Image: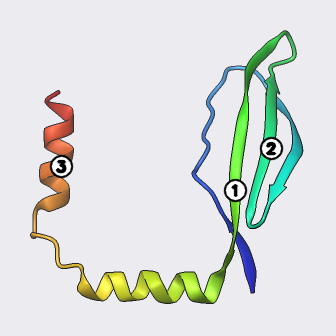
């Protein structure tokens, strides 16, 4: 089974936002898109978005192996959050 892997994109805006996306490049498993967002009044964002086609079963197996070997300290997440908030 093939799937794509991407970073998350999150927008918050007071108006309805429309995005125009165009696939501009395919390089092996890498897909590159241009993105333009419009709020009905003006263009509010332009950029590029990159995705990778992955083998889902292989990816999930690697993540599962990582989880088995990862043993965080009990309060590691809380410590990181507290550290971030104090900066």
Disc 3 target residue: 80
Callout in the foreground (2, 3): 2
SS class of the residue under badge 3?
helix
Crowd tier of the residue under label 1, counting other residues whose Cα lies within 10 Å: few below 14, some 14–19, many 20 or above: some
SS class of the residue under badge 1?
strand
- N-terminal-most mark, 3 or 1: 1
Are the residues tagged 2 and 1 within 8 Å (C-beta)?
Answer: yes
Residue 84 vs residue 38: left or right? left
**C-alpha separation, residue under disc 2 versus residue under disc 1:** 8 Å
Q: Position of residue 76 (x, y in %)?
A: 14, 60
Callout in the foreground (3, 1): 1
- Furthest toward the top, the residue is 41
Q: Residue at x 68, y 63 (%)?
A: 52
Q: Position of residue 28 (x, y in %)?
A: 77, 66
**C-alpha separation, residue under disc 2 versus residue under disc 3:** 33 Å
Are the residues tagged 3 and 1 within 8 Å (C-beta)?
Answer: no
Instruction: State the residue in front, 31 or 70.
Output: 31
**C-alpha separation, residue under disc 3 versus residue under disc 1:** 28 Å
Crowd tier of the residue under label 2, counting other residues whose Cα lies within 10 Å: few below 14, some 14–19, many 20 or above: some
Disc 1 target residue: 51
- Furthest toward the front, the residue is 27
SS class of the residue under badge 2?
strand
Disc 2 target residue: 33
The quadrant holding residue 26 is: bottom right
The quadrant holding residue 43 is: top right
Are the residues tagged 2 and 3 within 8 Å (C-beta)?
Answer: no
């Amino acid at each position: 089974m093939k799937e794509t892997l991407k970073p998350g994109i999150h927008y918050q805006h007071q108006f309805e936002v429309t995005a125009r996306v165009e696939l501009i490049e395919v390089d092996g498993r890498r897909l590159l898109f241009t993105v333009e967002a419009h709020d009905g009044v003006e263009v509010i964002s332009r950029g590029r978005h990159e995705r990778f086609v992955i083998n889902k079963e292989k990816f999930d197996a690697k993540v599962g192996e990582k989880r088995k070997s990862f043993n965080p300290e009990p309060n590691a997440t809380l410590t990181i959050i507290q550290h971030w908030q104090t900066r």
